[in-house]
Amino acid sequence: MGKNLTTRSEDYSKWYNELVVKADLAENSGVRGCMVIKPYGYAIWEKMQAALDKMFKDTGHQNAYFPIFIPKSYLSKEASHVEGFAKECAVVTHYRLKNAEDGSGIVVDPEARLEEELIVRPTSETIIWDTYRRWIQSYRDLPLLINQWANVVRWEMRTRLFLRTAEFLWQEGHTAHATEAEAIAEAETILDVYATFAEEHMAVPVIKGTKTAGERFAGAVETYCIEALMQDGKALQAGTSHFLGQNFAKAFDVKFDNTEGQQEYVWATSWGVSTRLMGALIMTHSDDNGLVLPPKLAPIQVVIVPIYRGQEQLEAISAVVNPLAARLRDRGISVKYDDRDTHKPGFKFNEYELKGVPVRLGVGPRDLANGTFEVARRDTLEKQVVPAEGIEEYIGNLLGEMQDAIYQRAKDFRDAGITEVDTYEEFREVIATTGGFVSAHWDGTDETEERIKEETKATIRCIPLDPKPDPGNCIRTGKPSPYRVLFAKAY
Amino acid sequence: MGKNLTTRSEDYSKWYNELVVKADLAENSGVRGCMVIKPYGYAIWEKMQAALDKMFKDTGHQNAYFPIFIPKSYLSKEASHVEGFAKECAVVTHYRLKNAEDGSGIVVDPEARLEEELIVRPTSETIIWDTYRRWIQSYRDLPLLINQWANVVRWEMRTRLFLRTAEFLWQEGHTAHATEAEAIAEAETILDVYATFAEEHMAVPVIKGTKTAGERFAGAVETYCIEALMQDGKALQAGTSHFLGQNFAKAFDVKFDNTEGQQEYVWATSWGVSTRLMGALIMTHSDDNGLVLPPKLAPIQVVIVPIYRGQEQLEAISAVVNPLAARLRDRGISVKYDDRDTHKPGFKFNEYELKGVPVRLGVGPRDLANGTFEVARRDTLEKQVVPAEGIEEYIGNLLGEMQDAIYQRAKDFRDAGITEVDTYEEFREVIATTGGFVSAHWDGTDETEERIKEETKATIRCIPLDPKPDPGNCIRTGKPSPYRVLFAKAY
Ligand SMILES: [Zn+2]
Ligand SMILES: [Zn+2]
């Protein structure tokens, strides 16, 4: 297998598209904008799901499931919400097909028209708050901390595998609280969960912040987010957590009796991460040889490739490898022993590099004689000869080291990719050349934000959490600004 | 909490509907035919998923994800398949909403009409075989053993929570093979997985068999199934595994080069179980006091209820209970200590009975003094005073015993519910009164099957696997029959 991968410096975008397909992560389907997530890509997503699901449960959340369809009238109840999603809704209008009377094939049965159109959920606030009205009567029913793993559909015109697809998989949390303070604390707790997950599992460093009014979720009072930096200098929003105030409670008339017996509207949050995280994972770490996966999310952490001629040599190698593989698995390490005789070792080496398997062990007759293995690590491509004795522990430690090293490398890159500028000229220069996050002053108005976007394609990614007071002047208008915000071109 | 549950003998159907809602398993949503699966119900489904997913992976399957939408033309490619699903398809025709020009609200944008309508998947054979055409070239690419966890939509006119809903959750396996024999073996392997899961995890005894031609999956050559018996004497199909022959390979032109370098069509299977299993679980075991859950699927296996007056007694009890709960959790037992002071013990006892928690421990000051707990088991409602010393082991054993006892009780009921009959008069009598499975001779024709169904509402649930030769005469026509088949009225 030659990799034939376009390099990042040649064409970063093409490199990404090719890598996703060649590493067997995902591909486009026959349905416009909808992807097929292939088994290897799905295995990574399952590992993400498992880690996140545990973090949600450890913070008191339960899973549930709500309908995929949302009556059009529900979507319309919260004005800014429908405004935000109306342009990208898949609409179900009929519930039956039939044979065309002229024998031309299968057609939609015009008599099976729905009285009210159904929207395939782009997000579930409306159907969930319609349900919460039945579940919440008293302060005793609060907080309600619920998450759902689901597919959602947003009819995007320009799609890219994982980054922007018409259908994607995600989790969406929807919580209900008795007080504003509690709801805000929940939104912040989840932001921390997302940041911890991104950094400790995905090895992707993130900046926590809030969105400007113009970039907020449709229906939110405040949108918290985590932002990551890709190798091409563009930012990627990796997760959002919204404080929804009482907007949905008011739209769906969800009130509770407080401890004084008075009726109040319920306070809400919602929050989500999606298969878009796969795009962040791929673009943060991978190189011109293919995927680089942090060990915690690698479906195969160690691959063992025998180098042999003839059945006898293979058997001698397998006699050493099989018990080693068992000992590694006892330590919770996922191992693949690739003893296929249909492919040469060089082909296999290439394949596992492309697929980002963190550690590769090579073993041939000479290694057997010497009691050694050749250990190659995917992140640095370094190789080392290691004694077979005690190699389980060596590999266990190595996987831990690699998880840290991959994170540190990404963090060094990200830190180096933040530039402070004080003039609009500098700003345009940085945005147009190296990119990255640009830390600059802004006068706080929608108009200025919009004008900068039109002029440079850069948007405000976030107002960093707890910004240190640092008064200055807006780069575009010169008006006063209390602290810097982060701009970038973004996915 | 008074349970106020309708009893089974009063109205079995009403008992079921009430139980599903009162035990917090699921409820109807504002979208016709679509249910909300509540956290407690979803926790049971998650346990089912985890067990099944492991069994699929242990038998070599991988998960993947395919689009929710199916172009109408794909669905139409396999003639009997579209025939089977056309009448219950949710059809997406538009991809945008807009503000009505007369200000009357949000309407479907007539300019955003799809060129080709998309069907919300009722099952995924067509979109998957369209994908497999790209994945399969050679015998080296086979077998392809893939499963997906997904939601599907079939527009049912009469719906019931879990048993028949417009949207449901399921897994669907789709495998591709080089030979007919291998594909048949796969379909049978999965039937065994389903039967093992039903019996060992759900404690639901099942009969394995094949469907008659009239009851086969639309597009299948052979449909294997497992059938269970509910307490009201009606059968429930709990899972199906289909041998699809080369039907979908031909419809989607999926060929492979065999070892001789010749092109052949690929052989296929598909198989699924759904949230319908929740219905089978509930109806098989539960009683007039509420749910009865087999310990392996119970989200809470042990609940501990303190019986106390005042904070001091509660603290003394908690000092004993908290370390016990920790020791039980160390054994992998899920424990809830319900020390809420807002509800009385009697209320809690009722609630956990209703929710089917297998084991309840009560502990009051007298128990503390005596070093004992009161242990109540949900299946038999028996109570016993047990020494605190060694109680972890006692409970561990008890949960195992209960799993077996619940299965055995259901199996005894099921076995007693199979009646052999040799005349149509007897047949009609049994079907109309006690119900259950009726083992009878049938002449093997669609017409007779159909006539019996019209006259008695009983259908052939299955032709048991490896039927013992037992020649006789069809109960309806007197024509010869090589072996008995199983009839029943069914969900
Ligand atoms: Zn941000
Ligand atoms: Zn059957």
Image (spheres, coloured by chain):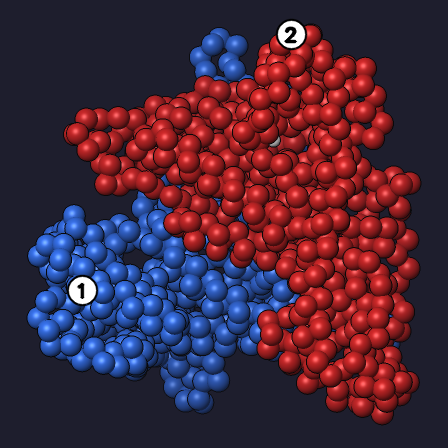
Chain colours: A red, B blue
**Residue at horizontal 81%, vertical 25%?**
A430
Q: Nearer the viewer, residue B270 or A150?
A: A150
Residue occupied by mark 2? A479
**Mark 2: which amino acid?**
Lys
Q: Chain of mark 2?
A: A
Residue B353, horizontal then vertical, whole percent: 20, 62
- Quadrant for residue B457, please give it: bottom left
Q: Taking B317 as reference, is A175 left or right?
A: right
Q: Taking A17 as reference, is B289 left or right?
A: left
Q: Is mark 2 within 8 Å of ligand 1?
A: no
- Which secondary structure lies at badge 2? loop
Residue B162, horizontal then vertical, whole percent: 36, 54
**Residue at horizontal 10%, vertical 54%?**
B310
Residue A166 vs B196, above or below: the answer is above
- Which secondary structure lies at badge 1? helix
Numbered-mark total: 2
Cα–Cα span, label 1 and label 2 = 65 Å
The quarter of the rendered structure image containing the C terminus of chain B is: bottom left
Q: Nearer the viewer, residue B359 or B211?
A: B359
* Classed neighbour count for the residue bearing mark 1: other residues with Cα under 10 Å, few (<14), some (14–19), many (≥20): many
Q: Nearer the viewer, residue B98 or A175?
A: A175
**Mark 1: which amino acid?**
Ile
Q: Taking A15 as reference, is A395 left or right?
A: left
**Residue at horizontal 81%, vertical 19%?**
A426
Q: On residue B79, which mark appears?
A: none
Residue occupied by mark 1? B317
Residue A8, horizontal then vertical, whole percent: 86, 43
